[in-house]
Image (cartoon, rainbow, N blue to C red):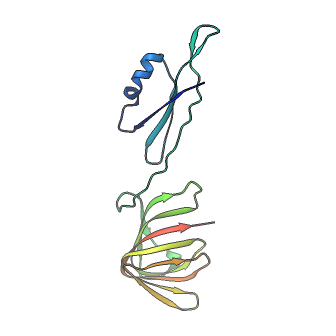
Amino acid sequence: MTTHFPISYTTGSNWMTTLSPLLSHHHSLPAFAIPTRQLEYRAFFPAPMHNTHNRKNVITFSGVAIMTAKLLRIREGQGEREAGPVAPEKVLAGMPQQLTEHFFTNSKGNFFCGVWSSDAGKWTLTYSEDEFCYIIEGEAIITDAEGSSETVTAGDAFCIPAGFTGTWETIGSVKKFYAIYED
């Protein structure tokens, strides 16, 4: 029977110091550790087993690395930033610039979230994905293909479904939280 001793450490700690009591007692002990998304490590180290047939200490390894999921807070200034103009072929008015601050992509690569902003301008939209939006500040006018318009301002939450076509017009500037799901 193998006994496991869980040892947790973070990237700020020295795992060799943490493990020195085990290493000094067992000479060398392989570690199984993987980083999680929040850079926390979980490692499992098995205790030695005695082999009575040849009277040597035999170390068996059946340790399992564990990944833990953690809450991810979305704070401006801490995501991956990408800035640039709206694609010129889509622009109907102005010279709108946009800033996307991407915070999360799921393991399947089909869910994304972050903060997006733009300055004044109007451009066409064609959605192949579903998007949830929450306007943090500013104002925009979203118009569908039939000409029906909705004005969204700070505090408004809404969804734009896959298949939507129309226009987005930023009045002054606008900033929103976004969450996008793609099949």
Q: In which quarter of the image is the N terminus?
A: top right
Q: Position of residue 29 (x, y in %)?
A: 50, 22
Q: Residue lying furthest top in this view?
A: 54
Q: Quadrant of residue 62?
A: top right
Q: Residue at x 51, y 83 (%)?
A: 167
Count the labels in the image: 0
Q: Residue lying furthest front in this view?
A: 1
Q: Residue lying furthest bottom in this view?
A: 147
Q: Residue at x 42, y 26 (%)?
A: 19
Q: Position of residue 143 (x, y in %)?
A: 51, 87
Report the front residue among 156 and 89: 156
Q: Residue at x 59, y 80 (%)?
A: 164
Q: In the picture shown, does residue 48 fall above or below 84?
A: above
Q: Where is residue 28 in the image (x, y as percent from the top left)?
A: 49, 19
Q: Quadrant of residue 20?
A: top left
Q: Residue at x 37, y 31 (%)?
A: 14
Report the front residue among 180 and 54: 54
Q: Position of residue 7 (x, y in %)?
A: 44, 33
Q: In which quarter of the image is the C terminus?
A: bottom right
